[in-house]
């Protein structure tokens, strides 16, 4: 899996949700290791969440797409006790802007 393949793979995975992680390598045509890396990226970027489940007598992860309420619950401001200017908040910047700048990385 190459960095340039991630946006297309992301679209494919999100269109298949909910699904078991064990099924993705066959559907996407990539290795199990690449599937694990891709799922970790999508989870870190708040596109999906996973729950452990038993599938065909083996443990795997069931992948689910996050909705807007779940994403907002991870915002740093909700538990923050600092009284700061949101325009200058480094935590808010890291949460909101950095994931968007990673998407713009391309070939």
Image (cartoon, helix red, strand yellow):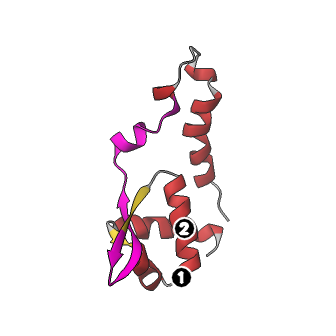
In the foreground, 50 or 54: 54
Q: Position of residue 62 (x, y in %)?
A: 36, 67
Give neighbour class at mark 1: few <14, some 14-19, many 20+ (Cα, 10 Å): few
Q: Position of residue 21 (x, y in %)?
A: 42, 73
Q: Position of residue 26 (x, y in %)?
A: 44, 85
Q: Secondary structure at mark 2?
A: helix
Q: Is residue 72 magenta?
A: yes
Q: Is residue 21 magenta?
A: no
Query: What residue did someone put label 1 on?
Result: 30
The correct choice, above or below, for 92 with respect to 29 in the image is: above
- Quarter in which the N terminus is drawn: bottom right
Q: Residue at x 57, y 17 (%)?
A: 82
Q: Residue at x 34, y 83 (%)?
A: 57
> Residue 33 occupies which quadrant of the picture?
bottom right
Q: Position of residue 83 (x, y in %)?
A: 56, 14
Give neighbour class at mark 2: few <14, some 14-19, many 20+ (Cα, 10 Å): some
Q: Residue at x 48, y 27 (%)?
A: 79
The correct choice, above or below, for 104 with respect to 35 in the image is: above
In the foreground, 32 or 5: 32
In the foreground, 26 or 2: 26
- Quarter in which the C terminus is drawn: bottom right
Tell me if 63 is positioned left or right of 107 in this view. left
Q: Residue at x 56, y 38 (%)?
A: 95
The correct choice, above or below, for 86 with respect to 97 in the image is: above
Q: Earlier in the sequence, mark 2 or mark 1?
A: 1
In the foreground, 102 or 30: 30
All told, the count of numbered labels is 2
Residue range (magenta): 53-76
Q: Secondary structure at mark 1?
A: loop
Tell me if 37 is positioned left or right of 15 in this view. right
> Residue 41 occupies which quadrant of the picture?
bottom right
- Residue 38 got which mark? 2
């Amino acid at each position: 899996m190459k960095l340039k393949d991630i946006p297309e793979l992301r679209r494919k995975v999100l269109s298949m949700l909910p699904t078991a992680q064990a099924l993705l390598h066959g559907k996407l045509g990539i290795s199990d290791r690449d599937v694990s890396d891709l799922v970790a990226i999508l989870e870190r970027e708040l596109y999906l969440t996973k729950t452990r489940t038993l599938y065909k007598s083996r443990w795997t992860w069931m992948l689910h797409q996050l909705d807007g309420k779940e994403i907002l619950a991870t915002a740093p401001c909700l538990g923050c006790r600092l009284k700061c200017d949101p325009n200058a908040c480094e935590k808010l910047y890291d949460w909101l802007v950095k994931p968007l700048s990673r998407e713009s990385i391309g070939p």
